[in-house]
Amino acid sequence: MEAFEIQLLEDTFTIEPLDNGLYRILEGENKVGVIYADSEGDQVIWATQDELEDGFVQQVGELITEHNM
């Protein structure tokens, strides 16, 4: 899959899908973190092992889901 951009408020992030279901988030040339979808029952929860705010991770995850539809 190819990288794509998302807009979150006034910020634009580049999303690089990785082969193992992870998504690398970049702001310009700087890596912000890596997130992944995790299922909790019948819900998809976005998670990270990086130090990112939960709200940010969920918002970016929702935009990735929207882009992939």
Image (cartoon, rainbow, N blue to C red):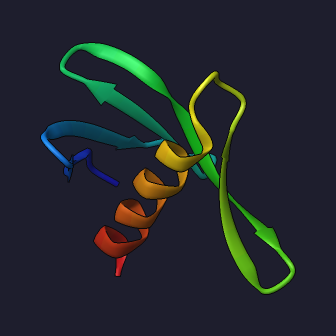
Does residue 38 appear to the left or right of 35 in the view shown?
right
Count of labels in the image? 0
**Residue at the spot x=68%, y=47% of the render?**
47
Position above or below: 25 against 4: above
**Residue at the spot x=78%, y=70% of the render?**
39
Question: Which percent across, then down, holds residue 49?
Answer: 72, 30
State the residue lying farthest toward the right: 41
Question: Which percent across, then down, holds residue 66?
Answer: 34, 74
Tell me the quadrant of the picture where the C terminus can be found.
bottom left
State the residue lying farthest toward the bottom: 42
Does residue 62 appear to the left or right of 57 in the view shown?
left
Position above or below: 28 against 13: above
Does residue 42 appear to the left or right of 9 in the view shown?
right
**Residue at the spot x=44%, y=66% of the render?**
62
Question: Which percent across, then down, holds residue 32?
Answer: 42, 22
Q: Quadrant of residue 26?
A: top left
Question: Which percent across, then down, holds residue 44?
Answer: 67, 72
Query: Which of 36/2 is in front?
Result: 36
Position above or below: 39 against 5: below
State the residue lying farthest toward the top: 30
Tell me the quadrant of the picture where the N terminus can be found.
bottom left
Q: Quadrant of residue 13?
A: top left
**Residue at the spot x=57%, y=35% of the render?**
53
